Amino acid sequence: MKTLNIIKKINNIKKLDNVNSNNFDFNFYNHQYKNTIINKEFINEKTFFLSTYKNNNIIFNLNNYNYSNKNIQLFNYYVNTILNININILELYRNINNKKIYSNYDITMLYNLTFNKLNEQNIIFSKKISNKVINVRTQFKASNIKILKKTSMLDIILKKYIETYLDSKVSINFDKYNINFFKRKNMYVKTIRRKLRRMKKMLKWAKISLRNFIRITLIFLCTKDIEIFSKILIKIMNSMHYKNHRRFLYYFKLFITKSMNYYFELLKFEGFFFYLSGKISGGGNSKKKNYAIRCGKYSLTNKMLKLKFKKGLIYTKTGVLGYKFMISYS
């Protein structure tokens, strides 16, 4: 139960709106969020423009701030690119009596991810319209600080991108799997992209970039979550013309067997098996065909391997394709 509660708390802070493929074009995300914004530097008259005093509140306007402060520039970057908040309207309030911080936007998630640790003070953010107060200490306890540190901003955006693409909620335990390895292997990811330029055109029909598909596949290899990856494969095949299914399967086979096998040993991923049967790239009176993608070890009788298996149907304009999907790991 404790693990489930922690996952729910993590998912509560992973709520980014208006996430699309353009968010991944910024190389600024990699580990930049870990820069600590010290409380003294974050809100004072030197960093932000002090506008007025109102009802025992000091109001700081972010429209005019000190550009020489790198932490404030980072905060402004996240506000504009990720949260899509109008910087001209965003205001921060510091109460003179209780020294608590308020805002007319709910920026709790951004504030907590930017800090490496929670402040000793009891900081509260509230929405001005609904008067709903969110207590940081009760929502995120000290025991969850390690989880927040291990979860990068790029991981959160990837999770939201998958949810937007599949139009359904997904749950990924970032603390357990710690999906940060592909940032260290950035040059290798670039090499993979060069080898798969032909596949890039086919993924455009599914409205997903090759870079995003590589990162989603890396998440799949790391989490061994067969449900999420099977949904993505089905959605990609449904979005393209049925005559291109065999071409996509060929490029996908090269992608798994020639490119992604580099990560198998690193992630203790033993085998990959994807089997498709039916009228593949054909219609009318064409015969049923089979296509299999095999890589590594996979066996239902091997007691040394952990297996995950899924089967289902893919509905096309010419009929129904049946698929079997199995992975093995140690």
Image: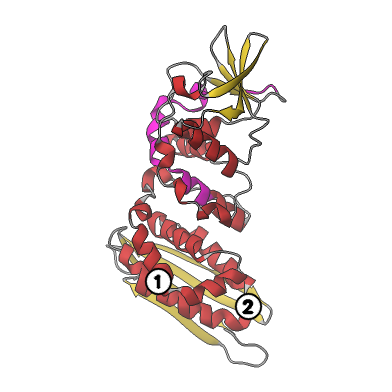
- The amino acid sitting under disc 2 is Val
The magenta stretch spans residue 212? no
Q: Using the image, determine if residue 223 lies above or below residue 104.
A: below
Left or right placement of residue 108 versus residue 115 in this view: right
Q: Which residues are magenta?
A: 131-159
Q: Could you tell me which residue is drawn at 33 percent across and 57 percent down? A: 185
As drawn, the label of residue 320 is 2
Q: Using the image, determine if residue 105 lies above or below residue 155.
A: above
Residue 135 visible in the current orientation: no
Pinpoint residue 16: horizontal percent, then vertical percent.
58, 43
Name the image quarter holding residue 192.
Answer: bottom left
Q: Using the image, determine if residue 214 lies above or below residue 28.
A: below
The magenta stretch spans residue 144? yes
Identify the element where label 1 is drawn.
Answer: helix
For the image shown, how many numbered marks are present on the structure?
2
Pinpoint residue 74: horizontal percent, then vertical percent.
49, 37
As drawn, the label of residue 256 is 1
Q: Dot 1, crowdedness within 10 Å: few (<14), some or many (≥20)?
A: some
Work out which quarter of the rendered image holds the C terminus and state it: bottom left
Q: Could you tell me which residue is drawn at 37 percent across and 55 percent down? A: 182
